Image: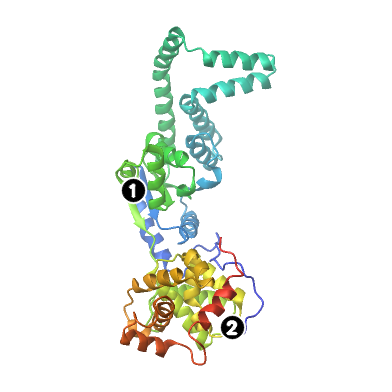
């Protein structure tokens, strides 16, 4: 086996805005077309969520779908929320993105910006308003800095009943104005969205990676301030992680799923769909074969066996596409080696069970026991054809328990699968030591 010089960076499918869904291995353009037909019939304000675990290509799908919508004359916004979760309030972020979208219409943009500023003024925390007031007075040079700050601190620390009552009375007086500001902003936004022939589509990516308080506040803002006809929000998220964020904000006893149901109208799963080839419809196998092409690896029988074994392990252990990218990077980094077809299981352990991998490096009996448990839990549809499981189950069982725990059938399967000319532990020890040079992030 030979490997030509090439980049060791993970060969993720590249996004080219001028070519939506170019290199679409998993037929996800079909989902985009289906969803486009759905949102085109929507006229109510709607929040949809594309739910998939981390590393399954949500961002790639979202960016390509957004690019495809632009080619069909949709007005589209794409926001990476994680990059901007330092903003004081998500309302400001969302309103700014909308204002930028309509910047070409000077009068409309100015109108929405002014009304959004009034809403923002109403919802900002009191402490932030105090700081902004200090900053503006200092910037204008209207007062001595130390005196301004001293006055602000004194005002903030004044907790007398009279001061509290005055503050509450002012809030009551301001409530009507604030409500009018909100209604005015929403009316302006609605007028813009309804003037469009097609829905305005706002993608929000990486929401589940944001600070929990920011993520929760953002979805609340969508409902309270941006729920207008002909405006569709598409959230690209990991639902499990977002539900954890909600529990982090409102308490572990919170029904996070029910809570999200108040704001998100529909969840959609991001599928991995491929056409069958060589009697295989395993999407992981399809993806791994594309990476063999990327790394320009010679397609020997050993390489094919490695790829097939890794794809089966990945399906059983719910490995993400990003996990597969890392696995192939490890494969390419190590280059040609003895018994390459035995590398899949050590790669899986390094990526998904680092503690077991490190224990095996030290020939820890407990690590062998844990490896046995992992393999015993695996349900493979075609057991007779998955020699990698037979080999490593026998190997770890013999190391942990001797030959007493292996049934005659398991021992026979192990004997058939083990490489000729090697002692039982040699393939595993060889690859553990080779893989150990690559630190796992």
Crowdedness near tag 1: few (<14), some (14–19) or many (≥20) residues, C-alpha within 10 Å: some
Q: Quadrant of the N terminus?
A: bottom right
- Residue lying at the far bottom in this picture: please name it: 421
State the image coordinates of residue 26 (x, y, percent, origin top left): 43, 69
- Position of residue 371 relative to residue 178, above or below, is below
How far across and how far down the image is residue 308, in percent? 44, 80
* Total marks placed: 2
Against 106, is 357 above or below? below
Q: Which residue is mark 2?
A: 337
- Horizontal and vertical percent for residue 438? 60, 68
Residue 350: which numbered mark, if any?
none
Residue at point 54% right, 66% down? Answer: 12
Residue 248 vs 277, above or below: the answer is above
Q: Position of residue 306 (x, y in %)?
A: 49, 80
Q: Nearer the viewer, residue 277 or 421?
A: 421
Using the image as rendered, state which of residue 151 and residue 377 is in the foreground. 377
Disc sitting over residue 42 in the figure: 1
Quadrant in the rendering for residue 253: top left
Q: Is residue 50 left or right of residue 106?
A: left
Colour treatment of the image: rainbow
Residue at mark 1 to residue at mark 2: CA–CA distance: 56 Å
Pick whichever, 92 or 380, lies toward us: 380
- The quarter holding residue 136 reads top right
**Is residue 300 something one can see in this rendering?**
yes
- Looking at the image, is mark 1 or mark 2 earlier in the sequence? 1
Quadrant hosting residue 329: bottom right
Q: Is there any visible trace of residue 227 in the rendered image? A: no
């Amino acid at each position: 086996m030979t490997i030509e010089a090439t980049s060791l960076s993970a060969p993720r499918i590249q996004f080219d805005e001028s070519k939506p869904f170019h290199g679409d291995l998993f037929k996800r353009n079909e989902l985009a077309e289906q969803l486009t037909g759905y949102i085109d019939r929507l006229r109510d304000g709607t929040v949809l969520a594309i739910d998939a675990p981390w590393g399954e290509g949500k961002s790639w799908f979202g960016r390509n779908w957004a690019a495809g919508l632009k080619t069909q004359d949709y007005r589209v916004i794409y926001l990476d929320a994680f990059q901007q979760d330092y903003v004081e309030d998500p309302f400001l972020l969302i309103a700014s993105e909308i204002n930028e979208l309509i910047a070409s219409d000077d009068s409309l943009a100015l109108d929405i910006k002014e009304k959004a500023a009034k809403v923002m003024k109403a919802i900002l925390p009191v402490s932030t308003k105090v700081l902004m007031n200090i900053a503006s007075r200092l910037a204008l040079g209207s007062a001595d800095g130390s005196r301004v700050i001293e006055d602000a601190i004194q005002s903030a620390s004044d907790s007398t009943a009279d001061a509290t009552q005055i503050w509450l009375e002012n809030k009551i007086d301001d409530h009507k104005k604030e409500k009018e500001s909100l209604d005015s902003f929403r009316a302006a936004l609605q007028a813009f969205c309804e003037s469009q022939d097609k829905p305005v589509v706002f993608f929000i990516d990486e929401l589940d990676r944001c600070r929990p308080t920011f993520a929760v506040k953002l979805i609340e803002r969508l409902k309270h301030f941006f729920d207008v006809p002909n405006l569709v929000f598409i959230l690209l998220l990991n639902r499990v992680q977002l539900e954890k964020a909600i529990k982090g904000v409102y308490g572990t006893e919170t029904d996070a799923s029910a809570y999200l149901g108040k704001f998100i109208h529909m969840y959609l799963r991001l599928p991995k769909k491929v056409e069958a080839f060589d009697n295989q419809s395993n999407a992981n196998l399809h993806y791994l074969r594309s990476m063999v092409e990327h790394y320009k690896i010679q397609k020997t029988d050993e390489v094919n066996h490695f790829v097939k074994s890794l794809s089966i392990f990945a399906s059983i252990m719910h490995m993400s596409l990003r996990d597969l990218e890392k696995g192939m990077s490890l494969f390419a980094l190590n280059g040609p080696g003895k018994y390459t077809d035995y590398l899949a299981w050590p790669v899986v352990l390094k990526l998904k069970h680092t503690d077991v991998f490190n224990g095996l490096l030290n020939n820890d009996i407990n690590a062998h026991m844990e490896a046995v448990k992992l393999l015993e839990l695996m349900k493979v549809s075609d057991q007779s054809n998955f020699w990698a499981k037979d080999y490593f189950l026998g190997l770890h069982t013999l190391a942990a328990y001797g030959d007493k725990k292996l049934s005659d059938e398991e021992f026979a399967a192990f004997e058939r699968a083990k490489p000729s000319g090697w002692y039982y532990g040699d393939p595993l020890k060889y690859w553990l030591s080779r893989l150990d040079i690559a630190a796992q992030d």
